[in-house]
Image (spheres, rainbow, N blue to C red):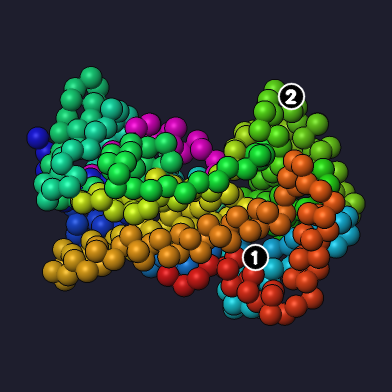
Amino acid sequence: MHKTSVVIIGGGPSGMLLSHILSEHGIDNVVLEKHTRDHVLSRIRAGVLEPGSVKLLRDVGLSTRLDKEAKFHNGTLIVWAGSERLEIDTMKYTGQPMAAYGQTAITEDLYDARAKSDGVIITEATDIMLQDIATDEPTVTYQKNGNRQEIQCEFIAGCDGFHGVSRNSIPVEKRRSYEKTYPFGWLAIMSETKPLEDIVYANHKRGFALASQRNEKLSRYYIQCDLDTDIKDWPDDKFWEELKSRFPRQMADEIETGPSIEKSIAPLRSFVNEPMRYGRLFLAGDAAHIVPPTGAKGLNLAFADVFYLSRALERFYHGNDSSYLDNYSKTALDRVWHTARFSWNLTRLLHRFPGDEPFDQKTRESELEYLSRSEKAMAAIAEQYTGLPL
Ligand code: RFL
Ligand code: PHB
């Protein structure tokens, strides 16, 4: 049997960032990841970071590549009704830019940093089970290369995403979940083409579309699709044609097309699990909550959890103070609900829903027009898009 202070379940961005920060504070930890490193790094997901996430990465020494490669945007565009547009000008209203920097790059940076400091990351750890989590001596068991292993620890951090085991280890009568599913998904492609200058969200009668980017030669595009969409029915040509049809003419003409290097479909979901702590188990990131990607909040919210949890563990180990651990769930959930509401609202505002009546779209357009005319409304949306301070 091995021993450590904190077992972190899940080697995605939440788990790896927590591992890095705890190690910086001299707190012993082990990460257990179900998949291989290559598998984790092959997932293409988030692309936009709030200033608070960038600051956190800088503060913990993880921004060397980010500062070289990220593209900072003063604002993000929303277009609708073929010709109308507004800019969420985060620079003007909050004095801060948003950063386009991919989750894949962040996760690579994290794996490299942990390797350099000899962090213990056990990949292909399967059949993970959490035991005695309501006691002061929890254990975690797993299989590796056909052998059963056991780690005794003081705390467990459940960072294993929406489909992980951690959340479900909390007795059902001790947790409550709130969920909303949406009657559509996002069909995404990555292509080695020059992106548009700006990140642009489009509300169009054929459905929502998004133009995003990873770097000067790498573009990421999304279109709203039906839930039963089969990716095989979407060859590249058809995707480009559909994408362009959802942007105003001039923007569509600027979209550079080319072969896709990745294509995937993601369903949209809002989900919150309460509380985010049970005994010695603390949940962070997608293990505890999911927001629809409109608003680019999921990874940023996960990093906020990691910030609160790492601070709480640091205070416990080095300040002999458990109050931050006791307040973790409440502190994190305040931000989670704020973000769940913002992401839901932007999703409602920018997508077309099956069964929509003309009234629904008229009120959406009226809201977008109000936003574009009212300085106060713009300031409020910019503040939320930028993310509240941690
Ligand atoms: P992850 O990334 O799911 O990582 C969890 C890790 O746990 C492992 N795991 C297990 N390990 C051990 N035992 C088990 N039983 C395990 N079960 C799972 C998994 O293999 C994995 O390595 O969760 P984490 O770390 O909390 O990170 C959350 C983010 O990945 C997520 O919130 C974002 O990707 C959401 N998101 C976006 N967030 C943003 O902030 N900005 C964006 O622009 C943005 N765009 C997006 C997104 C998510 C999307 N999808 C696919 C839903 C765009 C899309 C399309
Ligand atoms: C992305 O670049 O993948 C991205 C950007 C903005 C979003 C969601 C995803 O709201």
Point 86% across, 56% down: residue: 81
Point 72% across, 54% down: residue: 350
- Tell me if residue 14 is in the magenta stretch: no
| Marks 2, 1: nearer the viewer | 2
- Under mark 2, the amino acid is Asp
Q: Is 315 left, or right, of 222 in this rendering? A: left
Q: Is 360 left, or right, of 309 in this rendering? A: right
Point 18% across, 38% down: residue: 131
How far apart are labels 2 and 1 at the CA level? 34 Å
Q: Is 82 left, or right, of 312 in this rendering? A: right
Magenta residue span: 30-48
- Tell me if residue 42 is in the magenta stretch: yes
Tag shown at residue 176: none
Packing grade of label 2 (10 A; few <14, some 14-19, many >=20) is few
Residue 138 location in percent, x, y? Answer: 15, 44
N-term mark: 2 or 1: 1
Residue 296 figure quarter: bottom right
Point 76% across, 66% down: residue: 367
Residue, disc 2? 233
Tag shown at residue 73: 1
Looking at the rendered image, the quarter that the C terminus falls into is bottom left
Residue 87 location in percent, x, y? Answer: 74, 68
